[in-house]
Image (cartoon, rainbow, N blue to C red):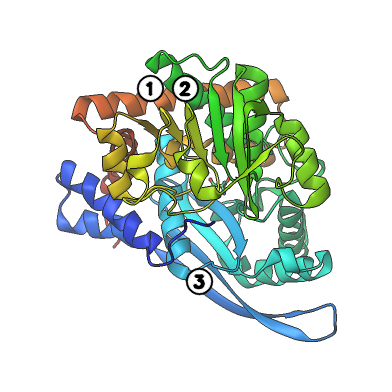
């Protein structure tokens, strides 16, 4: 993403966010230290045979941040800029995310340094299967359950499920979520992140007295989360999508873009850029353009002290993980902008992942309506819980959500006690 600053270490951001809340909760040294470091980290270097017959060595990670509340949970990211500190931060955020929506999981994350856009499907399959074998000793339905993240999808999960199952000698659908329906995936998982995000935008708009019908929405990132959020906000809430972008650039149309047609264009051409009837706009311009709702749905470190004071949206809904730096949080709060923090706004994905895992363990599957109704209940309830905390402590929503999450994790740590 254009605005991403490599100088900002996401794990330092994650640790600063923990300190802010640990101070408010008066957490003592020992518990605070436990919250600030990952429990388990695995680095794997492994060879993959390329289509031309050569092989390359790739580096991957799996970080299990905290398992006080249950097995760890979190996606796997394929991206050239993956670092161990990024995976640590993402694993910490998964811990708080699962706690905010009160699902019985700790947090984890995985990543492989690779450029999936320049790999063939065969190369991606071999990379995925070998990475899955390398992390197999520490994953499993009762241990740590991966899922899709940036540039991984249901097919990636099918390869991981198959590789793990072949090694066990029997099928283990509960080892990953976000699988295809045909092998134990859940109805509604594919769109859950975007759908969950649309529910909390709706709740926030209601509280602000903002009518979503005709409201303008700008979306940075048109992947798993952003494209679905744009379609649901347009189709179900009547919102007008005024700008969207991807890693190649952005497009805008003040009269509104049809997100289904944009998706079709992206499928055909590989990017939203050049969509008929639109004007080009940069990723940076999207963040500060005039709109009612801004949805950062790409990568970390997008809103900083440099651009936060220029944000014009009334609601910022973080479909991405970690798009806002702590300095920007303060600025947005002072400007009266409602931020829906990542650990709530994109928690719909992991919530339906939990539903998928529960269905797999029972071998009993739910309808799409059942999934969406339960998802809505979780998102609406968690939004209210977060607002209660934020109001009670006169803090912004991120700190409100962290207060809720960290208190739940701390309760679990305390009641379990320290082994031995
Ligand atoms: N990668 C998604 C996230 O960041 C989903 C994780 C999951 O379903 O386990 O929340």
Nearer the observer, disc 1 or disc 3?
1
CB within 8 Å, label 1 to label 2: yes
Q: CA distance from mark 3 to mark 2?
A: 36 Å
Residue under the image location 38 percent in, 17 percent down = 208
Q: Earlier in the sequence, mark 3 or mark 2?
A: 3
Q: Is mark 3 within 8 Å of ligand 1?
A: no
For the residue labelled by badge 2, is the local secondary structure a helix, a strand or a loop?
Answer: helix
Relative horizontal placement of residue 239, taking residue 100 as reference (left or right):
right
Residue 346 showing in the rendered view: no
Q: Which residue lies under the disc numbered 3?
A: 42
Side of 409 where 296 appears, left or right: right
Left or right for 341, reference 31: right
Whole-percent x and y of residue 385? Answer: 35, 25
Mark 1 burial class by Cα count in 10 Å: few <14, some 14-19, many 20+: some
Q: Is residue 7 left or right of residue 367?
A: left
78 up-or-down from 407: above or below: below
Q: Residue 384, labelled with which disc?
A: 1
Give the SS element for disc 3: strand
- Distance from the alpha carbon under mark 1 to that under mark 3: 37 Å
Q: Position of residue 350 (x, y in %)?
A: 55, 41
The residue tagged 2 is 380
Foreground of the two, 103 or 266: 266
From the image, which quarter does the C terminus lie in? bottom left
Residue 199 spot, x, y in % from top left: 53, 24
Say whether disc 1 or disc 3 marks the residue closer to the N-terminus: 3
Dot 3, how many residues are within 10 Å of its Cα: few (below 14), some (14-19), or many (20+)?
some
Residue at the image point whose x is 66% and y is 38% from the top: 227
């Amino acid at each position: 993403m254009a605005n991403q600053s490599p100088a900002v270490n996401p794990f330092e951001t994650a640790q600063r966010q923990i300190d802010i809340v640990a101070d408010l909760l008066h957490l003592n040294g020992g518990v605070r230290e436990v919250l600030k470091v990952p429990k388990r980290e695995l680095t794997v270097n492994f060879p993959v045979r390329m289509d031309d017959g050569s092989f390359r060595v790739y580096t991957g990670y799996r970080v299990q941040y905290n398992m006080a509340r249950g097995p760890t949970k979190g996606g796997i990211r394929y991206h050239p800029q993956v670092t161990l500190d990024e995976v640590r931060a993402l694993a910490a955020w998964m811990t708080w995310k699962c706690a905010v929506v009160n699902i019985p999981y700790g947090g984890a994350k995985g990543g492989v340094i690779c450029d999936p856009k320049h790999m063939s499907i065969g190369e991606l399959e071999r990379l995925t299967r070998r990475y899955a074998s390398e992390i197999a000793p520490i994953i499993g339905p009762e241990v740590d359950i991966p899922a899709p993240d940036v540039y991984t999808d249901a097919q990636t999960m099918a390869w991981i499920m198959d590789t793990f199952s072949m090694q066990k000698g029997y099928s283990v659908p509960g080892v990953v979520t976000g699988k295809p329906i045909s092998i134990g995936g859940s109805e509604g998982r594919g769109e859950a992140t975007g759908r969950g995000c649309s529910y909390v935008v709706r709740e926030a708009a209601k509280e602000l007295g903002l009518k979503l019908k005709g409201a303008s929405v700008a979306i940075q990132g048109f992947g798993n989360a952003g494209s679905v959020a744009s379609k649901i906000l347009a189709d179900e809430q009547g919102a007008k999508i005024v700008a969207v972008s991807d890693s190649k650039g952005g497009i805008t149309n003040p009269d509104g873009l049809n997100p289904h047609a944009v998706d079709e264009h992206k499928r055909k051409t590989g990017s939203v850029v050049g969509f008929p009837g639109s004007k080009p706009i940069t990723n940076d311009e999207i963040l500060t353009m005039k709109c009612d709702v801004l949805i950062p749905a790409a990568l970390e470190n997008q809103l900083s002290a440099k651009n936060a004071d220029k944000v014009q949206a009334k609601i910022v809904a973080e479909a991405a993980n970690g798009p806002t730096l702590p300095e920007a949080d303060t600025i947005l709060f002072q400007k009266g902008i409602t931020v829906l923090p990542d650990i709530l706004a994109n928690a719909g994905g992991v919530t339906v992942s939990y539903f998928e895992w529960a269905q797999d363990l029972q071998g009993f599957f739910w309808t799409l309506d059942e999934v969406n109704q339960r998802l809505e209940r979780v998102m609406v309830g968690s939004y209210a819980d977060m607002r209660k905390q934020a109001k009670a402590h006169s803090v912004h929503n991120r700190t409100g959500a962290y207060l809720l999450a960290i208190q739940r994790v701390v309760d679990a740590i305390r009641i379990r006690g320290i082994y031995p």
